[in-house]
Amino acid sequence: MTRRSRLWRGAAVLFILFNVAGAAFAIGMGEPMHALTHAVLLTLGLGAYLTWRVARPSRREDVTPKLADERLDYLQRSVDAIALEVERIGEKQRFSDKLRGEQVDTLPPKKEQ
């Protein structure tokens, strides 16, 4: 959890506690409209908190980009390794062709009978 979300969670808890205490105090003082105001604010605060909890992205989505990056890095290393092997095969083929060409040039001509 980030520091910013902890601060907002703390603010939400304080808001809810303040409104519960305010509603209780207003009921104790015999002020129904004042108590109703705190009850409405409490309901709005709880609704906002629950909406935030439901709407925020899950932790699995946070792991997915990291996993995708690891897979992409692995794929890149694999492609680089294949390219290196293909380069080696090409060098070997060129060397082999060069040796064959030199052997043909150095062989004595066949005698015709």
Image: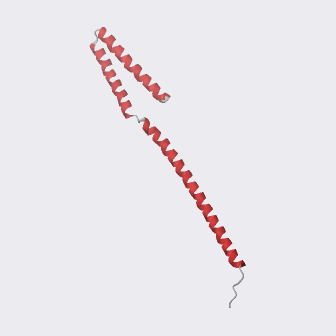
Q: Nearer the viewer, residue 97 or 47?
A: 97
Number of callouts: 0
Q: Nearer the viewer, residue 27 or 61?
A: 61
Residue 30 in percent (x, y) is at: 28, 9
Specify the farthest residue to the bottom.
113
Query: Which residue sits at x=49%, y=30%?
Result: 2
Tell me which colouring the rendered structure shows: secondary structure
Can you say which quadrant of the picture contains the C terminus? Answer: bottom right
Residue 89 in percent (x, y) is at: 61, 63
Q: Nearer the viewer, residue 105 or 8?
A: 105
Residue 87 in percent (x, y) is at: 61, 61
Query: Which residue sits at x=35%, y=17%?
Result: 19
Specify the farthest residue to the top.
29
- Left-right relation of 84 to 33: right
**Splitting the image into 4 quarters, where does residue 109 fall?**
bottom right
Residue 8 in percent (x, y) is at: 44, 26
Query: Relative to residue 29, is residue 3 depicted above or below?
Result: below
Specify the farthest residue to the front.
113
Query: Which residue sits at x=55%, y=53%?
Result: 78
Query: Relative to residue 49, is residue 78 depicted above or below?
Result: below
- Left-right relation of 79 to 106: left
- Left-right relation of 45 to 2: left
Query: Which residue sits at x=43%, y=25%?
Result: 9
